[in-house]
Image (tube, rainbow, N blue to C red):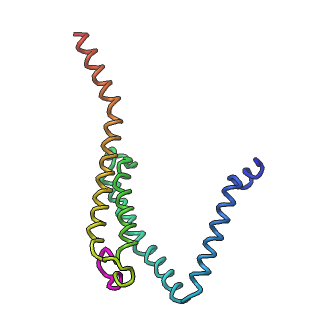
Amino acid sequence: MTAFRRRYGASPLHLLLVLASFALAAYAGVRLLKGETLGVALWFVGAALLHDLVLLPLYGVTDRAAQRLFWEIPGERSPRPSVNYVRVPVFVSGLLLLVWWPLILGQVDHYTAYTGLPADGFLERWLLITAALFVASAAVLLVRRLHESAPRRRAARRERRAREAAR
C-alpha cells in the first residue's frame, strides 16, 4: 500500500474515484454527442471562448479590485481574509444567475407550457437569495471578528487593571 501511495501520490480509492469520474464523463459525452453533434460542439467551443476571453478577465479584474479594497496595511501585498466574505456570496449569486438567467430575466416564454409552473418571481427570489447570502456572510464575518477581538479586549482589561493597581 505504501509503495502504491508513494508511486501514485494518493490512495487506491482516489484512483478508483478518478477513473469512475472519467467513465461517467465519457458516458455523458457519448450520450450528449448522440443527438446534434455539431450544435453541441459549437456550443461547447463558444462557451469556452466566452469564458476564457470575456468572463475570466472580467472576474479577475473584479477580484483584484475587491482585494485592493480589503488590504490589511496599505503598503502590504497580502489581502485580508475578509475579502472572502465578499467573494463567496458574489460567486454563489453569480453561479445562480448563470444557471437561471433566462428565467431570472424573463426570457423564457414556453416555461409554463412545458412545466406547468409559473415563470414569474425568479428575479425576486434571486435577489432575496443574493441578499440572504450577503447578510449571512456579514454575520459570519461579524461573529469571527468579535471572536478574534475577545482575547485582545481581555488583555487590554488586564493591562488597565494592572495600571490602576500600580497607581
Question: Which percent across, then down, holds residue 108?
Answer: 33, 82
Question: Which percent across, then down, holds residue 104?
Answer: 31, 74
Question: Which percent across, then down, holds residue 69?
Answer: 30, 53
- 43 falls in the magenta region: no
Which quadrant of the structure image shows residue 163?
Answer: top left
Question: Which percent across, then down, holds residue 11?
Answer: 69, 52
Q: Nearer the viewer, residue 81 or 114?
A: 114
Residue furthest to the front in view is 116
Q: Nearer the viewer, residue 47 or 1?
A: 1
Residue 114 versus residue 6 in the image, above or below: below
Residue at 35% from the left image edge and 41% from the top image edge? 144
Residue at 63% from the left image edge and 75% from the top image edge? 26
Residue 158 placement, left or right of 42: left
Q: Which residues are magenta?
A: 103-111
Residue at 29% from the left image edge and 79% from the top image edge? 106
Q: Is the magenta region chiefly helix, strand or loop?
A: loop
Q: Nearer the viewer, residue 146 or 53?
A: 146
